[in-house]
Image (spheres, rainbow, N blue to C red):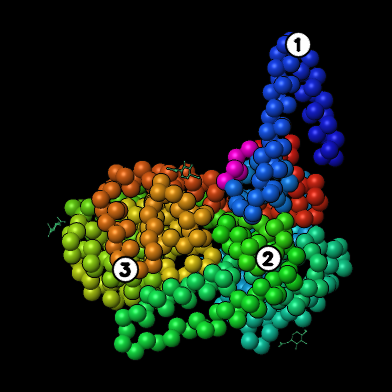
């Protein structure tokens, strides 16, 4: 069907060509000839280079399985083909609890079901209490828990097989190892999304060790540091049990090809997205939030941090860096949204720090709008923090460590914010740059952030990319880009 419509397109455009004068069409032919020779030569040249992720996503034309950039950066049109998908997720969110992987799964599969695809999710409730299965339109969620509250694989496969018998699934998707590798081996049509791999976790452990154990008199060994390398070796051995791999950052994609040695054609990058209707640029709500929480009018820069206030989220680093900088720069102010052991210590820092406690999800957008720059001091370079994308959607620049996942995908250059090495000195230097730039420069970077976020990190772009991915896995015709239906 698709090839027919393409033929028709060609025919109508070639009949249009007859209107041109001969000389013009000659010039055109020569131009096309040179262009195709050039494109051919540059493809050959690129093909012989060692594996590299080029940045030429604009004007991409070809097989999507060869794309070396996030699928989110393309614009996919509507297709009428419907999919039947099976999904394995460690948990399914119950209530408004925030959370990384399960929140991502819920956002994605609600969106795909809304697009008319039949989705069957095998999982357990996030609160580990008994719940009835969910059937909402095309979305079916089956809770198959064992005694410990995690997914009972045998039970899940009993349900899976009965649904599969009524009409086979087009594809199976697992969020990380929710479908274990020994089971995945028996499922040929399976794609896995990695939300964090041991190669990255190994770096987290390393940074935590370096950051926390250098000054302490009796260093505590950082948990699992000595286990990291064996875990990595184990992962590299079992990853080939999954057929297709989706990464949530460009850098993780590179690692899967270059270190884990997976075939490049089976590794794809689809970034996570956040709900662009919930996180919006709204300066008025920001001003209201500032008034409500009594932030002084005469402060020069309001920095904000959000999330669990625990050690491995880098709060010891921010605590030390901020107390240093606020001694020399009295106009800086820190707003802390979240709860955890470090909340009390922040509160003791002085009158230029305000600890708000955990915020309702609906208040988060107001919080982002109230600040001038969002600070994410994390020591965990695994996966990608959604808070960075949320802040960018609200038009705020970000200050964050220079991990490959972040500089490769989110803060790709200085237009979007500031990066630092995960140590106090480098952090202080970055804070100084923020203060030196001041609110006007921060505002301009914020505008660039919002534009970038809308072009890459929206929930709808993520859903479009996954939809096209599964269509492409079902029928290679959909691997071609652009299709006549694409925008
Ligand atoms: C898992 O489900 C199977 C099949 O229903 C059942 O026989 C088994 O006892 C369950 N295992 C656990 C640990 O709950
Ligand atoms: C802001 O105003 C308060 C009270 O008027 C004053 O104590 C504080 O020093 C001022 N801060 C700055 C940075 O000017
Ligand atoms: C930063 O990156 C964005 C997105 O790739 C690009 O549009 C912009 O031109 C870049 N800016 C600079 C200063 O390099």
Crowding around mark 1 (Cα neighbors within 10 Å: few <14, some 14 to 19, many 20+) is few
Mark 2 lies on residue: 261
Measured Cα–Cα span from mark 3 to mark 2: 35 Å
Mark 3 / mark 2, whichever is N-terminal: 2
Measured Cα–Cα span from mark 1 to mark 2: 53 Å
Q: Tag 1, which secondary structure?
A: helix
Measured Cα–Cα span from mark 3 to mark 1: 69 Å
In the image, 61: left or right of 308? right
Mark 1 / mark 2, whichever is N-terminal: 1
Q: Which residues are magenta?
A: 55-59
Q: Tag 2, which secondary structure?
A: loop
x and y, in percent, of residue 449 in the image: 44, 47
**The N terminus lies in quadrant:** top right
* Residue at x-position 72% and y-position 56%: 265
* Residue 333 falls in image quadrant: bottom left
Q: Are marks 1 and 2 in contact (CB under 8 Å)?
A: no
């Amino acid at each position: 069907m698709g090839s027919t419509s393409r033929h028709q397109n060609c025919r109508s455009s070639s009949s249009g060509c007859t209107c041109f004068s001969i000389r013009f069409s000659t010039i055109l032919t020569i131009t096309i000839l040179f262009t195709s020779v050039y494109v051919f030569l540059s493809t050959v040249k690129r093909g012989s280079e060692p594996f590299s992720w080029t940045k030429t996503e604009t004007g991409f034309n070809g097989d999507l399985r060869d794309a070396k950039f996030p699928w989110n950066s393309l614009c996919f049109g509507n297709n009428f083909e419907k999919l039947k998908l099976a999904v394995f997720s460690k948990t399914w969110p119950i209530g408004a609890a925030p959370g990384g992987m399960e929140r991502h799964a819920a956002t994605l599969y609600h969106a795909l079901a809304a697009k008319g695809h039949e989705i069957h999710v095998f999982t357990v409730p996030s609160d580990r209490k008994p719940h009835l299965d969910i059937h909402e339109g095309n979305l079916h969620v089956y809770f198959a828990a064992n005694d410990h509250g995690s997914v009972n694989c045998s039970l899940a496969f009993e349900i899976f097989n009965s649904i599969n018998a009524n009409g086979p699934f087009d594809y199976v998707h697992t969020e990380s190892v929710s479908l274990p590798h020994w089971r995945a081996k028996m499922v040929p049509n399976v794609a896995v999304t990695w939300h964090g791999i041991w190669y990255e976790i190994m770096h987290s452990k390393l940074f935590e060790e370096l950051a926390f154990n250098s000054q302490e008199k009796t260093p505590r060994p950082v948990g699992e540091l000595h286990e990291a390398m064996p875990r990595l070796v184990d992962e590299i051995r079992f990853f080939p049990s999954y057929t297709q791999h989706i990464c949530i950052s460009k850098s993780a994609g590179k690692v899967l090809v270059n270190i884990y040695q997976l075939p490049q054609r089976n590794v794809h990058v689809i970034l996570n997205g956040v709900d662009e209707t919930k996180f919006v640029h709204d300066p008025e709500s920001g001003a209201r939030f500032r008034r409500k929480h009594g932030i002084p009018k005469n402060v020069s820069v309001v920095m904000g941090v959000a999330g669990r206030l625990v050690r491995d989220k880098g709060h010891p680093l921010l605590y030390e860096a901020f107390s240093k900088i606020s001694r020399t720069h009295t106009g800086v102010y820190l707003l802390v949204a979240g709860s955890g052991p470090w909340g009390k210590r922040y509160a003791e820092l002085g009158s230029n720090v305000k600890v708000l406690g955990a915020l309702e999800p609906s208040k988060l957008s107001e919080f982002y709008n109230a600040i001038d720059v969002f600070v994410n001091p994390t020591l965990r370079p695994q996966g990608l923090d959604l808070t960075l994308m949320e802040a960018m959607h609200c038009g705020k620049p970000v200050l964050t460590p220079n991990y490959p996942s972040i500089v490769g995908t989110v803060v790709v250059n200085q237009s979007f914010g500031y990066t630092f090495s995960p140590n106090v000195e480098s952090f202080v230097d970055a804070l100084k740059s923020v203060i030196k730039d001041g609110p006007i420069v921060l505002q301009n970077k914020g505008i660039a952030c919002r534009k970038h976020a809308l072009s890459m990190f929206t929930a709808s772009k993520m859903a479009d990319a996954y939809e096209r991915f599964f269509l492409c896995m079902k029928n290679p015709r959909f691997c071609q880009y652009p299709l006549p239906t694409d925008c």
